[in-house]
Amino acid sequence: FATGQRESIHRSMVRALTISGHPKQLDDLYYALLDLVSNRGGDNNGQNPTIVIPRLALDAIIEAAGRLDITDRAFATFAELEVLFQVNPDIHTYNALISAVASSRSVKMLTLLTIFQDIEDKYQQLLARKEQVRNSDEETLSGTMPIVDVDLQPNSKSFSLLLEAMCDSGDFRVLEGILDHMEESRVLPSPRSLRRLLVALAKESVNNPAESSIEVLEKKIRKLLMLRSCGSEALMDSKDTVDFNKFVFNRVNNIKTKHNEEEKEKVEQIQ
């Protein structure tokens, strides 16, 4: 599937699994996939390669579990992918898990960062395996397991989900490092996530006016927004996007101005 088509199908499946607010539809799909696994039997290896477990369905189950606030179920399904369903998780699967955690009622940044670390570890293992294959002869490689090449690099959606989870949790402790990493790698989150982050930090600066690092973070976010606006994607080049960025900057400044005026009035009343 093309990226846009895949996302559209994924969203539709998640919506269908969560629309009732109960896990019945999720259970029905999960056990239907288990039936497919059991029907793989029949040859000497106990598997019928003509039966393929749809990865999109598994990704939808993982994200839907989080939206139904049964995050343990999301992690359990993720853990079963390779062993039970013979499916290797890719970045879309990891994004589904990140979204599941971010959608739960109590967002835990440590859990999300642990998932990102797991992605990095798996990606480095894949690179090491590819390097080993390049440096080995055919005789050495005979009998070894073939490489399953999957996309494991965090993408725009991965970072968008992470930033929006930060806004929901109010935990910005590792934000500066993440912003620097995104700029260096040129993997930029959605403009919506960056704008929402700007507004969240503006509110944070009102609550914690002594926090000097917030201004530094805001400058970094504005830079990423400008990079997005000047990007090659059609959406990013549009005048409307640039104008909306200005609207968000004005909104952030208005929040700070209003706070300063309120503080000034308080001082005048005391005097």
Image (spheres, rainbow, N blue to C red):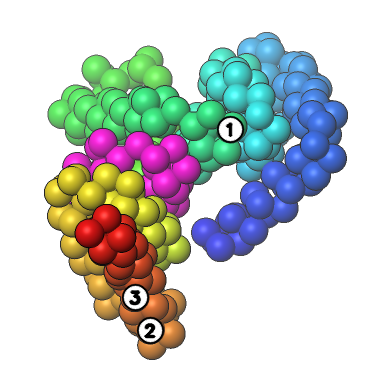
Q: Which mark is residue 104?
A: 1
- Determine the image quadrant of residue 112: top left
Magenta span main SS? helix
Q: Is residue 260 visible?
A: no
Quarter of the image for residue 202 reads bottom left
Residue at horizontal 36 percent and vertical 54 percent from the top: 203
Q: Nearer the viewer, residue 184 or 41?
A: 184
Location of residue 205 in the rendering, given as x and y in whole percent from the top left corner: 28, 52
For the N terminus, the quadrant is: bottom right
**Circle on res. 243:** 2
Distance (Cα) linking label 1 and label 3: 32 Å
- The kind of residue on which mark 1 rests is Ser
Q: Secondary structure at mark 3?
A: helix
Q: Position of residue 162 (x, y in %)?
A: 40, 43
Check disc 2: other Cα within 10 Å, few if <14, some if 14-19, many if 20+. few
Distance (Cα) linking label 2 and label 3: 11 Å
In three-dimensional space, the C-alpha distance between marks 2 and 1, rounded to whole angstroms, equals 33 Å
Q: Which residue is mark 3?
A: 250
Task: Write the start and end of the magenta stretch as one range.
Answer: 157-180
Q: Nearer the viewer, residue 264 or 207?
A: 264
